[in-house]
Image (spheres, rainbow, N blue to C red):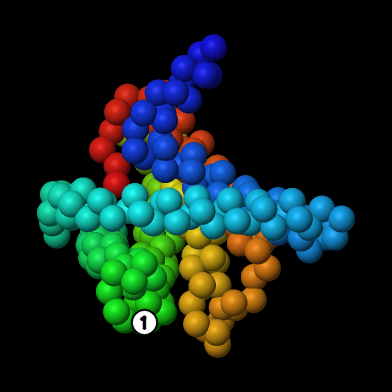
Amino acid sequence: MAALNGLASALESYRGRDRLIRTLGYCCQLVGGVLVEQCPARSEMGTRLLVVSAQLSHCRTVLRLFDDLAMFVYTKQYGLGSEEKDVFVRWLSVLGNVADQLYYPCEHVAWAADAKVLRMDSARWWTLSTALWGFSLLLGVARSLWTVLRLRQRLRSPMANLTSRLPQSKQRAIEVRMHSEVLTLLSNLADLANAVHWLPPGVLWAGRFPPWLVGLMGTISSLLSIYQAAQASGQPEAASP
């Protein structure tokens, strides 16, 4: 009952509902892709699951029409990251915020072009929005990797063995943050693999993923996101992007 209440509570929030829709969409693509490619007798069911996946993805696209303001407020609050001590992390975050801010209007134009609201070719706008998403993910990978390396270096420094310099509770906090950053790194890498796949042919492995592999990468990323959200809900609230 507690799990059911937790799920209902998560679904009352926009982020919680988006995580569930995203996970279901990629799971349908994963299972549907496997059925279509590996099980000819179940290909009809696989095709239906792929249709469901496409509709859930479209649903998320429409919901993101209202994300610009929230992103703008976050970007404005972060500013140039004056509170961030690490200069490298600060500028990676600033560039990531700019890419995320530009991503939304580009996707909105692409959606409007597909819906015939605007008379223009949507392909270039989808490419631009995907490129911005991929650039943001790449910055996120670099930020998480840098943070993990710095935290690991801090734990292995001679000071880490001195209780008076680095208390046990502080070491535990560093380990928890490292664990979180590793999960974020893996999630971003999975999404980055898909982002490259959706770029125009000729860019690395663009267009080469079968549907089930796209679903697998997305499912991994989505489940990691849900796991991190569940962990965060069980801890004291902290500011996070």
Tell me, yes or no, if residue 204 can be seen here.
yes
Residue 147 shown left or right of residue 213 in the figure: left
Identify the image quadrant of residue 202: bottom right
Residue beneath the point at 22% across and 55% down: 68
Residue 19 shown left or right of residue 62 in the figure: right
Residue 103 shown left or right of residue 212 in the figure: left
Tell me, yes or no, if residue 144 can be seen here.
no
How many numbered marks have been drawn onto this rendered protein structure? 1
Residue beneath the point at 55% across and 84% down: 201
Identify the image quadrant of residue 119: bottom left
Residue beneath the point at 63% across and 56% down: 50
Query: Closest to the observer: 43 or 139?
Result: 43
Residue 88 shown left or right of residue 75 in the figure: right
Where 37 sits versus 15, above or below?
A: below
Q: Identify residue type, mark 1.
A: Asp
Residue that numbered label 1 is attached to:
121
> In this view, which residue lies farthest toward the right?
41
Where 25 sits versus 171, above or below?
A: below
Disc 1, SS: loop
Residue beneath the point at 36% across and 67% down: 115
Q: Position of residue 157 (x, y in %)?
A: 42, 47
Query: Closest to the observer: 32 or 192?
Result: 32
Dot 1: within a 10 Å radius of its alpha carbon, few (fewer than 14), some, or many (20 or more) residues?
few
> In this view, which residue lies farthest toward the bottom?
202
Query: Closest to the observer: 144 or 60?
Result: 60
Where 97 sits versus 63, above or below?
A: below
Q: Position of residue 101 (x, y in %)?
A: 24, 62
Where 165 sits versus 84, above or below?
A: above
Identify the image quadrant of residue 107: bottom left
Q: Position of residue 48 (x, y in %)?
A: 67, 53
Q: Position of residue 12 (x, y in %)?
A: 36, 28
